[in-house]
Image (cartoon, grey):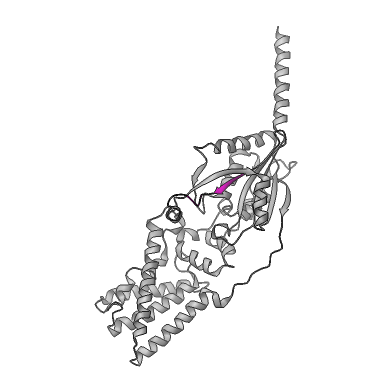
Amino acid sequence: MNRVLIFYGLLVSLFSLAAQNEKSDITVSILTCALEHDIYTIYGHNAIRIVDNTAGTDLVYNYGTFDFKTKGFIIKFMRGKLPYTLDVATYNRFIAEYDYFQRDVTEQVLSLDSLQKQKVVKYLEVNMQPENRTYKYDFFMDNCATRLRDIIDHNITGFTWDTTRASNKTFRQIIKEYQNRMPWTNFGIDLIIGAPADQKTTLSQETFIPDYLAEAIQFAKYADPKQNGLQLKENKILGFDLPNSNPNFLLSPYFLFLLLLLIEINIFFRHLRGISTHWIKKYDQFWLIVLTLASVLMLFMWFGTDHIPTKYNWNILWASPLIPLWWWKETSPWLSYIIGFGLVITIINAIPGIQILPQYFHPIVGIISLILILKGRRLYFSGDQVLA
C-alpha cells in the first residue's frame, strides 16, 4: 500500500512539474519608449510585455493610460485627481502606435525562472481586475515606470539593484534633462513645482523616469554569480534618426523677459525725468493682472491639489498676493520692506550656482523680481495707483 502511495505521489509530482514547465514558456520584458513633444510624453514611457508561447498570446500591459473624455478632465488633471488605468493591448497594436509617431522602442528581456514569470503574470492578472485597474497617478512616486519597478520588487527575488549607480540628482535635475529642449515648458514647470522637487533621489526614486528604470534594470545583478543579470538581453525594436531641434532664442522666455526688463528700465528713467503717459498705466495694469493670476495659480497648486511636487513653493515670494498692494500709495512702509526683502532673496536664489533657499529658482525669476522692484519703487514713491 505504501509503495502504491509513493508511486502515486511521484506521478503527481511529475505531472505538476510538467504542467509548470508548460506554463513557464513565457517571456517577460520591459519596453522603454522614447519621448515625444506633448507635455505628457516628454519623459518617455514604460510598459511590460508578456509573451506566452503556449497560449499563443503577445500582450503589453500599460499603466500609463487615461481618458481625455473623463468628466472634468482638465480640473481633475490639475488637481492630481485624474484616474490612471492599467490597460492591455496586443504587442502589434502597441508597436504600431509608436511606429506611427516615430518613437524609439527598446526591449529588455528579463532573466526569470518559471516561478517568477508566473508570479509576474498573476500579479498583472490581479491588477487587471476592474476593482484594481485604476490608481491615482503621482508624477514622482506612482507612474508607469514606478509601477513596473514595484512589479519587479514584489515578484522577483534573489537580485539586487546596483545602488552605487544612483545619480544623486534631485527630482528637478532629472526632469530638466528632458525639458531643456523646450524652454517654455521648462520655465513653466519650474514655476509650479516647489521644494519637494529639490530633494535628492535614491536609485529607487529616480526610476520614476523610464530611461532611469531601464538603466537600473541593466545593472541589476543576482546574488548567484553564475546567474545572468536581471536583464537577459536587449532588443532594439524601433529606431528613428530624428533631427535635433535647437530652441530659437528669440522665441524663448529669456528673450521676452530681458526685453520686458529693458522696457521697465526705460519707464523707470522716464519717470525720474517726470515723463508719464497713458500707455504706461495700461502696461502696469497688465502686469497687475498677470501677477495676480500667477499668485492664484501657485496657491491653487499648493493648497488646492493633491500634487506633492507643487507644495511648499517658494516662488510665492515674488508671486505674492501682497505685492499688488505695494503699488498703492496707502501701503504701509513695513509691507514695502518685507516684500522688497523677499524679492531681493528671490534674485539671489535665482543666480545660477547660488541657492540659499531649499528650492531651485529658474534664472528668469530673478529677472521678473528685478522688474517688480523697479516697478514697485516707481509706483510706491510716485504715489501713482495702478487701478486708479
In this picture, is 336 found above or below 311?
below
Query: Is residue 170 visible in this depiction of the protein?
Result: no
List x then y, in percent, for residue 309. Answer: 46, 57
In this picture, is 17 found above or below 233?
above
Image: magenta residue range: 61-70
Q: Magenta includes 69?
A: yes
Residue toward you, 48 or 356: 48
Q: Quadrant of the C terminus?
A: bottom left
Q: Which quarter of the figure has residue 347?
A: bottom left
In the orientation shown, which residue stands out farthest toward the right?
226
In the orientation shown, which residue stands out farthest toward the bottom?
273
Label total for image: 0
List x then y, in percent, for residue 117. Answer: 66, 37
In this picture, is 271 found above or below 158?
below
Q: Magenta includes 319?
A: no
Q: Which quarter of the figure has residue 270?
A: bottom left
Q: Is residue 41 left or right of residue 374?
A: right
Query: Is residue 325 visible in this depiction of the protein?
Result: yes
Q: Quadrant of the N terminus?
A: top right
Residue toward you, 151 or 107: 107
List x then y, in percent, for residue 263. Answer: 44, 84
Q: Is residue 297 left or right of residue 67?
A: left
In the orientation shown, which residue stands out farthest toward the top?
1
Q: Is residue 154 left or right of residue 331?
A: right
In the orientation shown, which residue stands out farthest toward the front?
69
Image point (66%, 56%), residue name: 100
List x then y, in percent, for residue 206. Answer: 57, 54
Q: Which quarter of the figure has residue 386?
A: bottom left
Image point (70%, 26%), residue name: 19
